[in-house]
Image (cartoon, grey):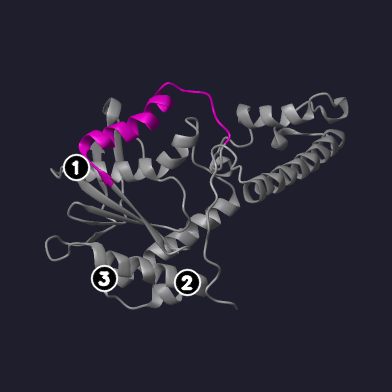
Amino acid sequence: MIRPSSLPMLAECPQFVSGGDDDTTEYANAGTMRHKALYALLAGDDDKPLLALPEVDRSGVQWAAEQIRLLAPMSDYPLECEVRDSFVGPEFIEITGTPDVVCGPYVFDLKWRPRNYDAQMAAYAGMRTNKGWHKVEVYLLFGATQRKSHLVFDPYEVDEALSKVIEPVLASDQPRPCEYCDWCSKRLTCSARLAQVNAIASGREDWELEQYHASQIESADEMGKALRLAKHVAKWAESVIYHAREMAVKRGQVPAGFKITTKLGNRFVS
């Protein structure tokens, strides 16, 4: 069984397994609070969940609720929040998940910042096409920027989008370092990430470690070498990010696989 919420990660790395660090857990908890506030607004309940959010989050959640009321065909279909559903996807894989909001052949999903969620939205659309709708419209609502993305799926497009992700997973393709590495339970032992570190450290005998899994380093000498290597890698990473931005902004050459985006600043200042 595959969860739709894991599909954006699996699209980037077929070996991804959920289980990140404390920072990602905090991020997930913040998302849960925003969704709770959204559902309360749509249900017309009290605004306590909304007031429990930081001020910078409230306007994004309120905007998302307004967009759903504006776009959902509520005169024709009931508005349903967080209803668990499932269907059988490509390769006879059962896909079970919980869309944020559905209204007939419409799906609405609150995200905070733009990323590629096409596979996840295809899975939610598949749950609706499985009920007989030939065309499903999906709206991704990005609260931080207060922008929306509109996707349309038919059963063929659902199958095509999901197959691109599921087939490499079933084939146990090699792991690929990506933006979701810190969310993965394999982040400390992943061969792809260790290969990146080794590539930077190659040619430096004083950086070579007996053990690259930080939790298994036992001696002070080895931990000292690991810490020095980590600092060098961090400086290298900062330099790459800086020069990549310079290349994109000043020379107009956007690094392959990335794009320049704009975002709104905070609407509130404490």
Magenta region's main secondary structure? helix
Q: Which mark is residue 53?
A: 2
Q: CA distance from mark 2 to mark 3?
A: 18 Å
In the picture shown, does residue 102 fall above or below 132? below
Residue at the far top in the pictured view:
171
Q: Which mark is residue 43?
A: 3
Residue 168, given in percent of the width and then of the height, sits at 42, 25
- What segment is highlighted magenta in the picture? 152-177
In the picture shown, does residue 199 fall above or below 99? above
The image quadrant that residue 78 belongs to is bottom left
At 27% across and 75% down in the image, what residue appears?
44
Q: CA distance from mark 3 to mark 1?
A: 26 Å
**What residue type is disc 1 on?**
Thr
In this rendering, position of residue 162 left or right of residue 174: left
Is residue 166 within the magenta segment? Answer: yes
> How crowded is the residue under tag 2: few (<14 C-alpha within 10 Å), some, or many (20+)?
some
**What residue type is disc 2 on?**
Leu
**What residue type is disc 3 on?**
Ala
Depth check: 103 or 184 in front?
Answer: 103
Can residue 126 be seen in the rendering of this structure? yes
Residue named by callout 1: 129
